[in-house]
Structures are given as structure tokens and as C-alpha cells.
Image (cartoon, rainbow, N blue to C red):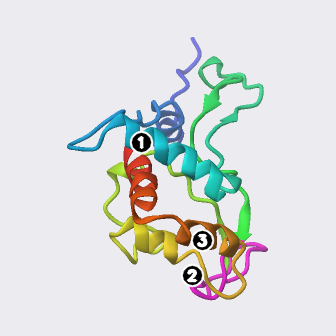
Amino acid sequence: TQPQKISSDAVNFADFMRLLAPPTPVTSYGNITSTSITQGSGLFETVGCSLCHTPSMKTDTSSTSALNSKTANLYSDLLVHHMGTGLADDITQGSAGPDEFRTAPLWGVGQRIFFLHDGRTKDLHEAIQQHASRGSEANAVINNYNLLSRDDKQALINYLRSL
């Protein structure tokens, strides 16, 4: 008989992570209504957040049927962007410079305690503001966000918390 082939722990863990169900968005929480969340969803698009935090993408052909041509609502374009001097951390990785970061997926952001690549804030409004600085590709989007009324900003934050 042939010896049984056993996967390594690393391969098993990678498979486990790859096949986890994505976070499920909520339709309301606490005193936050679905109306506010829906309004925030529209503002997410209008302001321009979705230019980088693309709400959904479709997976390519995969030999793993659970991953084959599936829609992933990860809220990322998976691209590397210049985020300016405010977020720069002087760490380079591959061809990415000290102010370049891959768009972080926002799925599950409502369950997070800390935000941004280095966890520098617990406040979503502050995390959004930190996207703006000299050389950031997000400056126009943050300007659009800053032009929103206080209630509209809160609706957008409520939407993010629902993800």
C-alpha cells in the first residue's frame, strides 16, 4: 500500500482561511435603522469611497468549486495606492513605497476595534480623515466626505459599521 498523503498545518490553515464564510452585513443595530444604513450606502458611492473600496468583485475560475466565479463583497480593489505623507510608515515592501498601501478590505469593519494599517485610531471618522494628506490619492474623496452634513457623515459611518 501507498503511504497516506497528509497536508501540512500551513496548507490546512490556508485552506481553512480561504474557505471561511465572509462577514455578514447587518441591516440594523442598536438604534441605527436600515434607512440610515441605506442612505450611508448611497453616500459611500457618491462621495467616491467605492473607487478604491470596491463593494464587490467576482473571483476567477478556480479548481475549488467553493471559490469558482463567486461574488466577494470585500470592499477593496486589491490595488496598491499612494496614501500620502500622513499614513506613510517608511516601510517598503516589494515595489511599494513608504506611502503605498493595498486597499484594505472593509468587510467586517464594523467588528473591528482599531483602524488603519497600524491601528492608530479607534474612531472611523478619524480613520477616514487620515486618508487625506500631501500626495494621497484619496484627497478628493475626503474633501467630498468633509462637504457632507453631520447627519450624512453619520449615515456613512453607520453604513461602515453595518459591514
Give the magenta-colored segment's residue range.
82-98
- Which mark, residue 37? 1
| Residue shown at the point (57%, 37%) measured from the top left | 73
Question: Could you tell me which residue is drawn at 65 percent across and 25 percent down?
Answer: 70
Secondary structure state at the residue bearing disc 2: loop
Residue 102: which quarter of the image? bottom right
Q: Is residue 74 left or right of residue 99?
A: left
Give the side of residue 112 with respect to residue 117, left or right.
Answer: left
Which badge, 2 or 3, comes first in the chain's sequence?
2
Side of 31 relative to 3 (left or right):
left
Task: Tell me the amino acid under the disc marked 2.
Answer: Leu
**Which residue corresponds to mark 3?**
142
Return the residue nearer the eye: 48 or 3: 48
Mark 2 closeness class: few <14, some 14–19, many ≥20 residues within 10 Å: many
How packed mark 1 is, by other alpha carbons closer than 10 Å (few <14, some 14-19, many 20 or more), is: many
Find numbered disc 3 in the image and state the secondary structure of the residue it sits on: helix
Secondary structure character of the magenta stretch overall? loop
Residue 22 at what x, y percent from top left? 47, 34
Q: Would residue 44 be visible to someone looking at this image?
A: yes
Please report contact status of discs 2 and 1: CB closer than 8 Å, yes or no. Answer: no
- The three-letter code of the residue at mark 3 reads Ile
Crowding near the residue tagged with mark 3, few <14, some 14–19, many ≥20 C-alpha atoms within 10 Å: many
For residue 23, above or below residue 65 = below
Q: Looking at the picture, how far across and down is residue 160, in whole percent?
A: 44, 51
Left/right placement of residue 113 relative to residue 17 reads: left
Front label number (2 vs 1) = 1
The one nearer the camera, 52 or 44, is: 44
Between the residue at mark 2 and the residue at mark 1, the CA separation in whole angstroms equals: 28 Å
Decide if residue 26 is in sight here.
no
Numbered tag placed on residue 88 in the rendering: none
